[in-house]
Image (cartoon, helix red, strand yellow):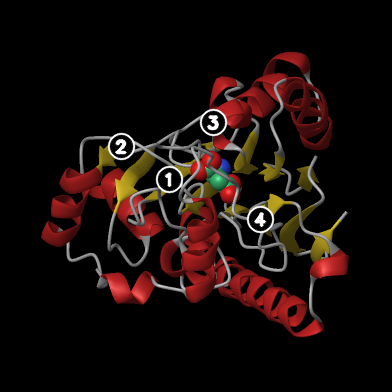
Amino acid sequence: MSKISLVIHGGAGTILRSVMTPDLEKAYLLALQEALEVGYGLLENGGSSLEAVKAAVMSLEDCILFNAGKGSVFAKDGSQEMDASIMEGKTLMAGAVSAVRNIRNPVELAYTVMTKSQHVMLNGKGAYDFAILNGIKTEPDDYFFSPFRYDQWKQMQDSDEAALDHNVSLTDKKFGTVGAAALDKHGNIAAATSTGGMTNKQFGRVGDSPIIGAGTYANNKTCAISCTGHGEPFIRAVTAYDVSCLMEYKGLSLEEAMNVVVHDKLIKMDGEGGMIGVDANGNTAMVFNSEGMYRGMKNSSGKNIIAIYK
Ligand code: ASP
């Protein structure tokens, strides 16, 4: 049987065992496993890596525990604006949306931008209009409301700070951006990322998640990557593409390249976070420089890992 692999993340940050309750931990592990099963099931049935990453990310977007889709964080003005992207390694086609509101599954909209428009990234109101034209599911503001996110934002609203939602001071609540990378039976890889961004973000701020090459990248020649962390350094470091470049131009393995970017380059730029990735041989890696990263992987060699802490 041809190899298949799926690797996912649910965000990185100050995630400490000491402040996690057993019930919450169980809920996270279940949600991660469920997303893995959804995506992996598609791969097993011959589905494409693109379909698998979309499905895995949609499963995480529908879960209130993660900062994407339903569980998105609040911006300074009390709005919830989401970013997402998806890329296919075989064709180098990509789709992305930024600062969208009321879209149930931003990654599905990013996929639709890729497959049904002549553009790569649509923003805000235009992206919403495109969603309506293409029958993408929307939800009222209430759907996206969660009391704990609201409290996180209220704690910060009077400051000019924006925070990774795992790092806001309400320390027993940790939630994150989501992403997936996959290899399918046909040897093609893909990656996708979706987020509500950073709590208390201002002025229409857009992070790395919807930016091809920063938060997401896929190229059959090298790797498929989805990042999570403090978006600004990730944009400046062109993080996901840098991993691909280190593999393509320097011959590094996936894990070696991710280690250079996460533990050296990003650290020098104060870039807290991590990434997950897969290469065209089905090798996966999950690397982070924060206290923890919600993560999981499953492959056709029988490996199935779900983890949170270092
Ligand atoms: N990278 C995301 C952003 O900066 C946040 C996250 O990964 O949690 O918008």
Gap in angstroms between the C-alphas marked 4 and 3: 20 Å
Query: Going from the N terminus, do you reach mark 3 or mark 1 first?
Result: 1
Gap in angstroms between the C-alphas marked 3 and 1: 11 Å
CB of residue at label 3: within 8 Å of ligand 1?
no
Q: In which quarter of the image is ligand 1?
A: top right
**Is 291 drawn above or below residue 69 in the view shown?**
above
Gap in angstroms between the C-alphas marked 2 and 4: 27 Å
Q: Quadrant of residue 300?
A: bottom right
Q: Find residue 166 and name its label.
A: 4
Q: Residue 52 versus residue 11: which sits nearer the camera?
A: 11
Q: Find residue 214 and name its label.
A: 3
Question: In the image, residue 256 lies at what x, y percent?
Answer: 84, 30
Kindly identify which residue carries mark 2: 121
At mark 3, the secondary structure is loop
Lateral position of residue 34 relative to residue 1, left or right: left
Query: Going from the N terminus, do you reach mark 3 or mark 2 first?
Result: 2
At mark 1, the secondary structure is strand
Specify the farthest residue to the top: 249
Does the rendering let one see residue 47? no
Q: Residue at 30% across / 37% down in the picture?
A: 121
Lateral position of residue 83 relative to residue 125, left or right: right
